[in-house]
Amino acid sequence: MDGTVLVADDDRTIRTVLTQALTRAGCKVQATSSLTTLMRWVAEGAGDVVITDVMMPDGNGLEMLPKIAADRPSLPVIVISAQNTIMTTIKASEAGAFDYLPKPFDLPDLMKRTAKALEASQGRAGGVGTGNWR
Amino acid sequence: MSEARKLWAALPLPAILIEANNQILALSPAAEQFLMSSERALKGHNLFEVVAFEGELEDAFERARREDAPLFVNDVSVGRLGRTLERCDLQFAPYDADQGQMLLLITPLSQGSRLPRALGPQSAGRSVIGMAEMLAHEIKNPLAGITGAAQLLSMGLSSDDRELTDLIVAESRRIVKLLDQVEEFGNLSPPHLDAVNLHDVLDRARRSALLGVGADMHIVEDFDPSLPEALADADQLLQVLLNLLKNASEAAGAGGVIRLRTSYEHGFRLRTSEGLGELLPLQIEVIDNGPGIAPDMIEQIFEPFVSGRENGTGLGLALTAKIMAAHNGWVSVRSEPGETIFKLSLPRAPQHSKGA
């Protein structure tokens, strides 16, 4: 896997695990606990894929999806959330998330989906994407 | 902690601070309890998207904000959207007029009767469940870290060592399963009440039990054939009955006898804090001949996480109580060695509904 993944989660353990896992897989990682920082990175053109939590201290990750889609339509966003309800899943897909995973996620599964998102982002999608992003 | 923060935490009433655009800025601990959600979970959300108010209060709130004057609303239903609402008095007062920030104070009208001892079994679990739901969310984050770290570690390990990291992952999943059950519990939808023939539901429950949980049991029916229709949600009632049948089967053991009895009791009604409750004349009893429930457990048997079984989650009977409460019905238990009776009491369907 190559490319840069932007990670936004206010839980330090999640940032650590994702940073380690993605770095070991060959990605570059920028991790933050703040949506504001994430949105700044997105605006600056950084990253090939975003992995974001929903409930953050400075806002709701799902509400950022339309903004990301408007700014960077080809930037896939994977949403991870401990709010494991059907509504969250529906909202995430309606908001244009590339993928949604409930916490605690299966790490190999998340890595597979991230790889798929990276392929999609870098224009190498082979039509196998599970996401319904635009 | 600053004095202001201390004061905020000490507020005995639910208080919510909101921004000019109605986004939630802060919840007092009492408001977290009242809404069964953490400040972290609700912060940034539009007040009207997460809290339900009876009537169109949004405009009235907006007027109060514009006129920079407090608004008092008495005796309205308020609560977390999609959950049970409570009768409350509201005060909506300007907090920082320049920024349009407002403070909402909620006074639940039943405050006086909400002392733990005054709670019936049906409502006792509510606050615990609210807390558990909040915890479920807070526990999943560290669990995600734990399983993720274990899975990362396992990559470079021998199969012997991997057995141990697999164990960490598997046991974490077990906790998640329990948490999901708790969340499901909190998200139970309100019943769709309709005229229901209880014997039809009992029949469905009995047949389903004989195929599964009660396969080795003798199930005996003792029905009052003249029983009128009940006002109930047939599917939720089926869930309750299956759960009671499962408990009865486990209590009585293979070859045990379960009796299903229905009867009509004129004048059966509950006494509530507001006086006499609705008439609940329709009775269903699930009776097993097991060893009975320990007296020290029977008091709390409808509380969540109270279980007499080694692997029980203790949520089955709590869910039963919750469903019955949503039906305005009642569940009670009587137990002695050789006879345990769970009794469901339900209201009658209005006679003119469903062309009867």
Image (cartoon, rainbow, N blue to C red):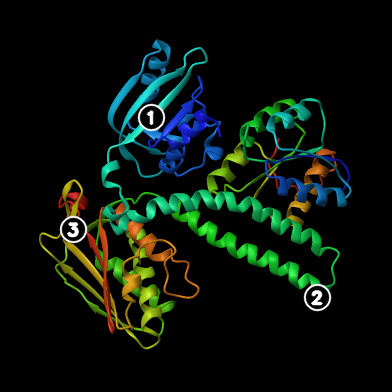
Badges 3 and 1: C-beta atoms under 8 Å apart? no
Q: Position of residue B83 (x, y in %)?
A: 39, 44
Q: Position of residue A52 (x, y in %)?
A: 69, 40
Identify residue type, mark 3: Leu
Badges 2 and 1: C-beta atoms under 8 Å apart? no
B207 or A50: nearer the eye? Answer: A50
Could you say which disc has been placed on residue B105 in the image?
1
Residue B69 at least partly seen: yes
Badge 2: residue crowd in 10 Å (few <14, some 14–19, many ≥20): few
For the residues marked 2 and 3, what is the alpha-carbon distance in whole angstroms? 61 Å
B261 or A123: nearer the eye? Answer: B261
Q: Is residue A82 left or right of residue B351?
A: right
Q: Nearer the viewer, mark 2 or mark 3?
A: 2
Badge 3: residue crowd in 10 Å (few <14, some 14–19, many ≥20): many
For the residues marked 2 and 1, what is the alpha-carbon distance in whole angstroms? 58 Å
B235 or B156: nearer the eye? Answer: B156
Residue B81 at least partly seen: no
A61 or B165: nearer the eye? Answer: B165
**Quadrant of image for the C terminus of chain A:** top right
Q: Is residue B228 left or right of residue B312?
A: left
Of mark 3 and mark 1, the one earlier in the sequence is 1
Of mark 2 and mark 3, the one earlier in the sequence is 2
Query: Label 1 is found on which chain of the structure?
Result: B
Query: Label 2 is found on which chain of the structure?
Result: B
Q: What residue lies at 20% left-to-right and 66% top-to-bottom?
A: B283
Q: Read off the residue under disc 2.
A: B160
Identify residue type, mark 1: Leu
Mark 2 lies on a secondary structure that is helix
Q: Read off the residue under disc 3.
A: B280
Identify residue type, mark 2: Asp
Rendering quarter of residue A50: top right
Q: Are marks 3 and 1 on the same chain?
A: yes
